Image: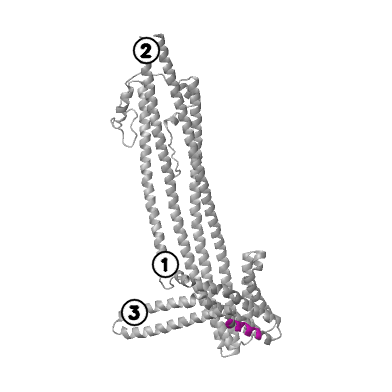
């Protein structure tokens, strides 16, 4: 992913003027009207710069949260796979031991001597116990991995929610940026109207004198 | 405003000069000089041309970035569609899986209605049975006859109780159907062998299809038959408890008590409520293992009736096979689920990238709009400035 979806070069000729309010007022004519216009333009420019920074921060947050969401999902998948392996191998081991125990038990039933039968019965009991132990241990391991998977699932949902909140804030900032741009444009229009009026007055004065 | 000399031709000079950005032969890879190919007459013209050129360059750059972003979005869309297609193909493949262990999903869907009712109704009774047997023994430790009466009662319920009888019917039906499949397989093989003398290829196909059908029948009637496993489980537990009971003595009481505690915990979850799931699981494990070891040890000291021992052993073997298959299914199901989730994560990642590009595109379009507006404003300002200066100049001339 690139560092930011926000266009970092975004600026207009209205924003290209990087001077302070006094210097700008001087450039725009230096009278009281130019000072008002310069003040509004500088305020708008600073506001837009702040909004731009906020937007870039929100965009970075969105990207971080989206990356985190994907990472959590992959972790969840990994934990689910481990839980399945733990559970599955435990059950297979338990099943194999149960088969062995059953076989020993059948052998004991058909043993020729009572002593041999007792030994086989004992071995069968031990094997059955190990089978139960294997099953239980597998269940424990599986439960731990399942718990981790659920935790990652919750993390993915939380990251998604954070990204959605940042997207909403980004939309709000976009509206604010438009508002600041309108303010700057109003200042330009104001200055133009004032200049035109002044020029018209000057012309009228010249004709009057003539 | 910066004082500049008045020049009424400035607006006329503006248009042709900005339309020749390559006239001065720019260095490749570098932006052309702002005033290349122009002949500014005064400061005002120079300033307006500079603004115009900057605006044009900025617009062109934004347009180029929009085109590039559009291309990236198209590539991401193709990537997204590719991943989606892979996911669909994987899901389809899973449905069509007719391998050795076959598709569980299809069979489960076919039998789910029957099995759910069976499991819910019979699980309770099957779990109750060993508990009741244990309680019966604990109540009558010195009276084996009373305990055997209890066993007889429990066993008679297997066929008299409507719910348990259903489980037994399922068990019998499953085993019978599988035996029928074995018989079919034997007949098919006999026929195939007869034909195979003339056509070996047909014999190979017949064996392959016969084995596939046999495995499918085994899966449906045995492995996936809940009733089968319920009955086997009940018989095993009953046989284990009976073995310990026959051996008698105080240790038998302890063994049966431990098994009863394990079953009670599974059923009522008392420890689970008090100390959590892990404690409950450990309780069940310890009680079951200790109870089984104790019961087995006691039985080992006493010669059990042969039939009972064979029942215990056979049930254990069958349960073991079932557990092994369940383990295999657990690994395979978890693997498939994990694969699905990974595909979902990859698709999500591509979607995120697309959303990011979409936001960038929206921003670039806003920028283009803003720069276009700014360009227009600059032009208007320039025109207004020149007109004002011209008017002032005209007024001065008129006066003169």
Residue B155 shown in magenta: yes
- Visible in this render: residue B233? yes
Local crowd at mark 2 within 10 Å, few (<14), some, or many (≥20)? some
Residue pointed to by mark 1: B95
Label 2, label 3: how far apart the Cα atoms are: 112 Å
Residue pointed to by mark 3: B204
Chain identity of mark 3: B
Give x and y (percent) for residue B243: 62, 83
Q: Name which of mark 2 and mark 3 comes first in the sequence.
A: 3
Label 3, label 1: how far apart the Cα atoms are: 26 Å
Looking at the image, the residue that sits furthest to the bottom is A112
Give x and y (percent) for residue A39: 51, 26
Residue at 36% over, 10% down: B399
Decide if residue B85 is on the left or right side of residue A159. left
The answer to which of B400 and B196 lies nearer the viewer is B400
The answer to which of A2 and B180 lies nearer the viewer is B180
Magenta segment, which residues? Answer: B149-159
Residue pointed to by mark 2: B396
Give x and y (percent) for residue B242: 63, 83
């Amino acid at each position: 992913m690139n560092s930011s979806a926000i266009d970092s070069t975004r600026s207009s000729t209205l924003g290209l003027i990087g001077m302070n309010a006094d210097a700008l007022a001087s450039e725009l004519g230096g009278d009281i009207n130019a000072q008002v216009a310069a003040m509004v333009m500088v305020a708008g420019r600073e506001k837009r710069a702040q909004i731009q920074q906020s937007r870039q921060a929100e965009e970075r947050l969105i990207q971080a949260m989206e990356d985190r969401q994907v990472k959590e999902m992959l972790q969840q998948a990994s934990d689910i796979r481990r839980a399945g392996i733990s559970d599955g191998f435990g059950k297979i081991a338990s099943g194999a031991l149960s088969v062995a125990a059953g076989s020993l038990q059948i052998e004991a039933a058909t043993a020729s001597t009572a002593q041999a039968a007792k030994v086989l019965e004992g071995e069968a009991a031990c094997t059955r116990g190990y089978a139960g132990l294997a099953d239980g241990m597998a269940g424990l391991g599986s439960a731990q991995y399942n718990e981790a998977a659920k935790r990652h699932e919750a993390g993915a949902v939380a990251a998604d929610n954070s990204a959605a909140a940042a997207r909403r804030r980004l939309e709000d900032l976009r509206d604010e940026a438009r508002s600041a741009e309108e303010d700057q444009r109003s200042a330009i229009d104001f200055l133009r109207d004032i200049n035109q009026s002044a020029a018209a007055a000057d012309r009228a004065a010249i004709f009057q004198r003539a | 405003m910066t004082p500049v000399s008045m020049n009424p031709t400035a607006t006329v000079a503006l248009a042709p000069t900005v339309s020749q950005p390559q006239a001065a032969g720019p260095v490749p890879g570098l932006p052309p000089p702002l005033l290349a190919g122009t002949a500014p007459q005064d400061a005002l013209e120079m300033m307006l041309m500079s603004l115009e050129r900057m605006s044009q360059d900025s617009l062109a750059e934004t347009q180029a970035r929009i085109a590039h972003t559009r291309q990236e979005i198209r590539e991401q869309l193709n990537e997204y569609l590719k991943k989606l297609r892979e996911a669909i193909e994987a899901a389809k493949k899973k449905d069509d899986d007719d391998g050795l262990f076959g598709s569980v999903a299809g069979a489960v869907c076919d039998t789910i209605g029957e099995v759910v009712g069976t499991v819910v109704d019979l699980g309770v009774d099957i779990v109750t049975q060993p508990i009741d047997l244990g309680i019966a023994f604990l109540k009558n430790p010195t009276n084996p006859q009373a305990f055997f009466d209890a066993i007889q009662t429990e066993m008679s319920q297997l066929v008299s109780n409507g719910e348990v009888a259903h489980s037994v019917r399922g068990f019998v039906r499953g085993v019978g159907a599988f035996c029928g499949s074995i018989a079919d397989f034997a007949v098919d093989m006999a026929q195939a062998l007869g034909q195979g003398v003339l056509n070996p290829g047909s014999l190979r196909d017949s064996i392959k299809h016969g084995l596939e059908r046999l495995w499918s029948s085994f899966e449906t009637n045995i492995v996936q038959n809940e009733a089968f496993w319920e009955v086997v489980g009940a018989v095993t537990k009953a046989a284990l408890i009976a073995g310990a009971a026959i051996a008698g003595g105080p240790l038998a009481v302890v063994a049966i008590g431990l098994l009863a505690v394990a079953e009670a915990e599974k059923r009522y979850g008392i420890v689970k409520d008090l100390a959590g799931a892990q404690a409950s699981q450990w309780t069940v494990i310890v009680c079951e293992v200790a109870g089984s070891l104790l019961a087995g040890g006691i039985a080992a000291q006493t010669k059990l009736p042969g039939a009972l021992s064979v029942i215990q052993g056979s049930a254990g073997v069958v349960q073991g096979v079932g557990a092994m298959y369940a383990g295999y299914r657990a690994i395979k199901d978890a693997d498939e689920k994990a694969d699905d989730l990974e595909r979902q994560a990859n698709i999500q990642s591509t979607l995120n990238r697309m959303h990011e590009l979409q936001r960038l595109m929206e921003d670039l379009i806003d920028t283009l709009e803003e720069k276009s507006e700014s360009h227009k404003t600059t032009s208007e300002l320039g025109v207004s400035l020149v007109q004002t200066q011209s008017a002032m100049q005209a007024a001065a001339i008129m006066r003169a």
